[in-house]
């Protein structure tokens, strides 16, 4: 069984900094390969496979919300409104109608390579275009080591929607307003019966929280009414304190996408209020059309933006948990954490790199100053990822 030694490591759900740690993983010949069997400071009898000095071993990032089909249309419609770019009749869907399948897959693979190079070991994709869209995603990642949570988008046909659910890990719905009450109830029932994830965009824009179509809080009320208990909600950019408390009480997961919100000019997520309410949100880089798939950029923007727009000072350690531990929890996967039983997915950060070498706090350095160039190695399921 592979054994790794790290001079410094971020261990457990609280990302505690520990020194001289041995991480024992399960081998390919075990019943559950690619998992962490034990984390200890006692040297095991088993020979050590690799030793890491002047390096920080930390969990791989969990990118909990993406749309990687946008990879072929980066920066399209810059400065336009959200609905005009990614809405049902938006510019990106017009691109999808014209572009070749091969080019779509190539663009999506490029984004996966970018994620691997920047230390993302798990990502969740909201896959548009029904069954066809899921086929593209499966083709994209079929020979790549990254862990993928595929959330398909239901089509007009219930039969096709069931095929989408059977092929993927759940449904990723765009908005409660794009479906009838009956459709929402049916989709929810089918999803729950199959034990799959059910996620939806909620309160992303101010319009969805306060216009004539949706009185304040109405969108969230409809989601909770017709989808029973969804697995997680994406955005909540314009949620008020009462709504956040309600989501926390129900134990529903949340994923925030601050850079995506900023690109489309729709607002800034109230992350500090979420944490105060007891929500432990994950982080996502959202549409590739608007943002690079880079979690370092996401954490930095979140911390600086919270101070500027919300007048709140976030704990960098808590933000790092959002990018790792909390993302795994939201997706209901044992990833994004170094602990016994979790996936052996970790990345190595060069602590001697000039941009983070003299940081007064390791969590501040990682969230405010680190970048993909500081990722020296990536391991997924106990195996080093190469050639990304």
Image (cartoon, helix red, strand yellow):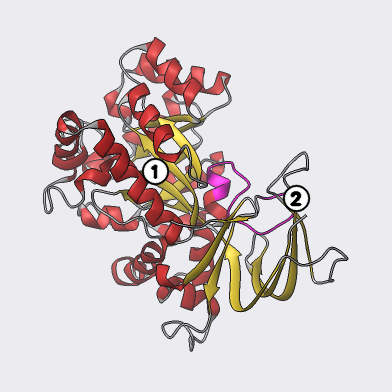
- Between the C-alphas of marks 2 and 1, the distance is 34 Å
Q: Residue furthest bottom?
A: 358
Q: Residue furthest right?
A: 45
Residue 335 counted in the magenta span: yes
Whole-percent x, y for residue 87 in the image = 20, 35
Please give the residue where the numbered disc 2 appears in the rendered image. 26
Disc 1 target residue: 234
Q: Does the segment drawn in magenta span residue 296?
A: no
Q: Residues within 10 Å of mark 2 (few under 14, many from 20)?
A: many
Tell me if I can see residue 239 in this picture. Answer: no
Q: Residue at x 25, y 38 (%)?
A: 103
Closer to the eye: label 2 or 1: 2
As displayed, is residue 330 above or below residue 298? Answer: above
Q: Secondary structure at mark 1?
A: strand
Q: Main secondary structure of the magenta part?
A: loop
Instruction: Rate crowding at label 1 as few (under 14), some (14 to 19) or many (20 or more) other CA atoms within 10 Å.
Output: many
| Residue at image coords 38%, 60% | 294
Q: Which residues are magenta?
A: 328-342
Upstream in sequence: badge 2 or badge 1: 2
Q: Are marks 2 and 1 in contact (CB under 8 Å)?
A: no
Q: Nearer the viewer, residue 205 or 169?
A: 169
Residue occupying the point 52% across, 51% down: 327
Residue 77 in the image: state x and y as whole percent. 12, 48
Residue 128, percent from left and from top: 32, 31
| In the image, residue 200 above or below residue 294 | above
Q: Left of 121 or right of it: where is 309?
A: left
In the image, 192 versus 77, the foreground residue is 77
Q: Work out whether residue 329 can be spotted.
A: yes
Image quadrant in which you'd find residue 211? top left
Q: Identify the mark at residue 274; answer none if there is no mark.
A: none
């Amino acid at each position: 069984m592979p054994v790794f030694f790290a001079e410094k490591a971020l261990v457990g759900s609280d990302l505690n900094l520990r020194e001289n740690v041995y991480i024992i993983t399960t081998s390919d010949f075990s019943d559950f390969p690619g998992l962490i069997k034990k984390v200890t400071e006692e040297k095991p009898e088993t020979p050590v496979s690799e030793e890491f000095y002047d390096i920080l071993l930390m969990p791989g990032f969990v990118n909990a919300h993406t749309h990687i089909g946008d990879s072929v249309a980066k920066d399209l419609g810059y400065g336009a409104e959200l609905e005009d770019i990614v809405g049902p009749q938006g510019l990106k869907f017009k691109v999808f109608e014209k572009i070749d399948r091969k080019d779509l897959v190539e663009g999506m693979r490029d984004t996966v390579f970018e994620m691997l190079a920047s230390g993302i070991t798990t990502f969740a994709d909201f896959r548009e275009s029904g069954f066809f869209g899921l086929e593209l995603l499966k083709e994209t990642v079929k020979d790549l080591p990254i862990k993928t949570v595929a959330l398909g988008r239901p089509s007009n046909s219930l039969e096709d929607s069931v095929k989408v659910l059977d092929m993927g890990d759940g449904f990723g719905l765009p908005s409660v307003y794009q479906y009838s009450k009956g459709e929402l109830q049916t989709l929810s029932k089918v999803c729950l019966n199959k034990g799959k994830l059910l996620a939806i965009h909620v309160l992303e824009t101010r319009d969805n929280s306060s216009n004539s179509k949706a009185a304040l809080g109405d969108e969230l009320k409809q989601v909770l009414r017709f989808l029973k208990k969804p697995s997680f909600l994406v955005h909540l950019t314009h949620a008020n304190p009462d709504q956040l408390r309600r989501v926390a009480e129900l134990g529903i997961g949340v994923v925030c996408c601050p850079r995506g919100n900023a690109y489309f000019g729709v607002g800034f997520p109230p992350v500090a209020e979420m944490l105060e309410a007891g929500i432990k949100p994950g982080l996502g880089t959202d549409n590739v059309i608007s943002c690079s798939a880079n979690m370092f950029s996401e954490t930095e923007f979140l911390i600086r933006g919270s101070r500027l727009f919300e007048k709140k000072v976030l704990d960098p350690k808590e933000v790092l948990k959002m990018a790792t531990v909390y993302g795994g929890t939201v997706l209901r996967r044992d990833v994004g954490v170094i602990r016994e039983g979790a996936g052996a997915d970790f990345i190595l950060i060069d602590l001697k790199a000039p941009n983070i070498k003299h940081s007064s706090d390791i969590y501040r350095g990682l969230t405010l100053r680190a970048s993909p160039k500081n990722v020296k190695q990536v391991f997924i399921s106990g195996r080093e990822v190469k050639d990304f």
